[in-house]
């Protein structure tokens, strides 16, 4: 197994006593890829990230992160892993009484960085995230969004090759969230590997090329395009209010999901072959159809279908 | 096992900056030494103010029937200072408890532990850095309090004794040898308890119980059941040294990244 700046996971599992947090994880994240890790609360995403960052030892299986094999065979390998990996935790985890500069300076020291170089790097990032000029203020006085942005700056301070981001835009206003998303895209362009844990599926759709859906075990690893399955949704434009026809379509035996907005009806289903039945149901209900376009089903549909399995 | 002094010093630096900005903690730290220093100065001042008081002679004879009347007050001054060292030891135990339980369990409370453990710092470096951040100010405070005690006692006792009553060999031995052992013990227990309970207030309360044996010993001394002196304190020091070794062994077992994450994270 080798993964120079990527991640390779084989049969990873973690138990806490009798409880299995996550099991049977196998996937690969290629260098420079933005990979989504999806799953409901308690699905084992955080445990997975903690295993891949060397914070928890796997109960079973193995992995290679940035060329460092897991489970860690000794402390020096752990240090090597942490030098190459960055982790943005769900909570920013900053020291309130310390200033932003002191918070960053502390982590620069832990990573053995030259303080001058690290500070020059940090200043650029602070500028980008709109925190320039606030570096000497205690972090306790920062808003939630400012804290989140500072935590991102801290995560990137040592220029990690692999970056794990747990809900990176949580608590951010739309403008700041966009800055973070742009930064993520730029990091991927630089060749860094990013693993994004998020409940924000729109964000995942924008940033990730592939995703793993887990719910205590791996439900799927798939390219987003495959997951959304082109052809398993129809965008139908009808005359008048499309809402009149939702019941007629939803009543079909294969129970498609239906949403409408003005004269547009979006219908998602499991198999491309079910599209004609949708059209037939609409015609039978009296709909005057202007256009019907095959589309990909929303990621949300695919995700909910996967996490509902075996519930 | 690799150990980086640089990373341990980074933890020391961060905790020191944090402590310096924690006004509430600084006031809490200062309160105990004030009491420890002022009380014996008042007692000595009371003794030397009325050296001919027959009650003082009776008190001296209660502790030692062989004391001659003309040496009674000096005997009492020396005795109260020797006995007071037991209460002075509360300081090197309690101040590190105050700092360490906050610094260690506080990492969990503030959710700063996970980013910290995701950095290259090792658990040993973390414990060493945090212990230094607790022990250095604690020992400095103890020395400062000792200096203030010496000055205060000598100022009030000089008209009577015409010589320096403090520092004496017992206090020098105690301050420089016994009190660091106690500070190490207090810090170690606070760190261990913090690692188990992960709540700074509970850790402080549980660790604070450590001072109870010292209060008990002091009560025995003032009640005349126990006689303090160099051998007495050397024996206490030896016991605490053994306990220090036990704390280090327990800390080695308890402090790995996995345990910290599952208990604290």
Image (tube, rainbow, N blue to C red):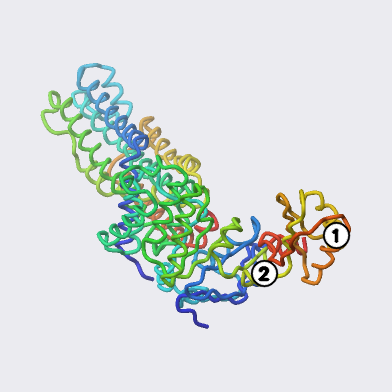
Query: Mark 2 to mark 1: distance in Å?
Result: 29 Å
Percent coordinates x, y for residue B144 in the rendering: 23, 39
The residue to which callout 1 is attached is A283
Q: Quadrant of residue B119?
A: bottom left
Which element is circle 1 on? Answer: helix
Does residue B255 appear to the left or right of B73 in the view shown? Answer: right
Q: In terms of image quadrants, where is residue A140? A: top left
Mark 2 or 1, closer to the camera: 1
Foreground: B82 or B10?
Answer: B10
Dot 2: element: helix
Quadrant of res A197: bottom right
Query: Closest to the observer: A252 or A130?
Result: A252
Looking at the picture, tell me which residue is in the foreground, B176 or B217. Answer: B176
The disc at residue A227 is 2
Counting from the top left corner in percent of width and height, residue B26 is at: 33, 37
Name the residue nearer the viewer: A197 or B43.
A197
**At 40% from the left edge and 34% from the top edge, which residue is drawn?**
B220
Q: Is residue B181 visible?
A: no
- Disc count in the image? 2
Q: Position of residue A259 (x, y in %)?
A: 74, 54
Q: Eyeballing the image, is A9 above or below A111?
A: below
Rendered location of residue B99, percent (x, y): 38, 44
Q: Residue at x 46, y 60 (%)?
A: A182
Indicate which disc, 2 or 1, sits on the residue closer to the N terminus: 2
- Using the image, name the chain to which the residue with label 2 belongs: A
Crowding at dot 2, Cα within 10 Å, few <14 / some 14-19 / many 20+, comes out as many
Q: Residue furthest bottom?
A: A1
């Amino acid at each position: 197994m080798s993964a120079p700046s990527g991640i390779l996971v084989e049969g990873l599992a973690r138990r806490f006593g009798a409880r299995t947090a996550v099991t049977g994880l196998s996937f690969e994240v290629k260098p420079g890829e933005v990979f989504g890790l999806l799953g409901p609360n308690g699905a084992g995403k955080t445990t997975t990230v903690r295993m891949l960052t060397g914070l928890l030892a796997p109960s079973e299986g193995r992995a290679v992160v940035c060329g460092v094999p897991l489970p860690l065979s000794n402390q020096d390998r752990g240090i090597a892993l942490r030098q190459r990996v960055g982790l943005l935790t769900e909570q920013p985890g900053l020291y309130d009484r310390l200033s932003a500069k002191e918070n960053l300076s502390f982590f620069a020291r832990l990573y053995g960085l030259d303080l001058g170089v690290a500070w020059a790097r940090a200043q650029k990032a602070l500028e980008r995230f709109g925190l320039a000029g606030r570096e000497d203020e205690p972090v306790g006085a920062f808003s939630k969004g400012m804290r989140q942005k500072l935590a991102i700056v801290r995560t990137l301070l040592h220029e990690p090759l692999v970056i794990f981001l747990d809900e990176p835009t949580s608590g951010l206003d739309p403008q700041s969230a966009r800055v973070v998303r742009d930064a993520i895209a730029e990091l991927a362009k630089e060749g860094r590997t990013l693993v994004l844990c998020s409940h924000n599926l729109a964000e995942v759709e924008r940033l990730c090329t592939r995703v793993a859906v887990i719910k205590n075990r791996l439900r799927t690893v798939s390219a987003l395009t495959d997951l959304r399955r082109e052809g398993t949704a129809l965008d139908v434009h009808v005359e008048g209010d499309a809402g009149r026809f939702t019941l007629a379509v939803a009543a079909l035996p294969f129970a498609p999901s239906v949403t409408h907005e003005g004269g547009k009806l979006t219908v998602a289903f499991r198999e491309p072959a079910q599209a004609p039945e949708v059209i037939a149901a609409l015609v039978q209900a009296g709909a005057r159809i202007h256009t019907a376009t095959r589309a990909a089903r929303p990621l949300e549909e695919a995700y909910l279908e996967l996490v509902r399995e075996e519930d | 096992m690799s150990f980086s002094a640089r990373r341990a010093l980074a933890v020391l630096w961060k905790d020191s900056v944090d402590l310096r900005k924690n006004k509430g903690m600084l006031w809490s730290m200062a309160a105990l030494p004030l009491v420890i220093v002022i009380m014996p100065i008042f007692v000595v001042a009371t003794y030397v103010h009325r050296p001919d008081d027959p009650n003082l002679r009776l008190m001296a004879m209660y502790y030692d029937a062989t004391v001659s009347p003309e040496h009674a007050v000096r005997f009492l001054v020396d005795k109260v200072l020797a006995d007071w060292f037991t209460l002075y030891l509360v300081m090197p135990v309690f101040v590190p408890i105050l700092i360490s339980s906050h610094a260690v369990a506080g990492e969990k409370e503030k959710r700063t532990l996970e980013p910290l453990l995701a950095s290259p710092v090792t658990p040993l470096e973390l414990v060493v850095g945090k212990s230094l951040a607790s022990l250095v100010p604690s020992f400095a405070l103890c020395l400062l309090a000792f200096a203030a005690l010496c000055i205060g006692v000598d100022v009030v006792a000089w008209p009577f004794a015409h010589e320096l009553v403090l520092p004496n060999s017992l206090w020098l031995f105690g301050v420089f040898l016994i009190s660091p052992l106690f500070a190490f013990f207090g810090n170690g227990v606070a760190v261990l308890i913090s690692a188990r309970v992960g709540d700074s207030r509970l850790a402080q309360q549980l660790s604070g119980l450590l001072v109870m044996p010292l209060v008990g010993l002091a009560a025995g001394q003032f009640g005349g059941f126990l006689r303090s002196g160099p051998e007495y304190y050397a024996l206490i020091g030896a016991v605490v040294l053994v306990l220090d070794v036990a704390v280090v062994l327990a800390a080695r077992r308890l402090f790995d990244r996995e345990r910290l994450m599952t208990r604290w994270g």
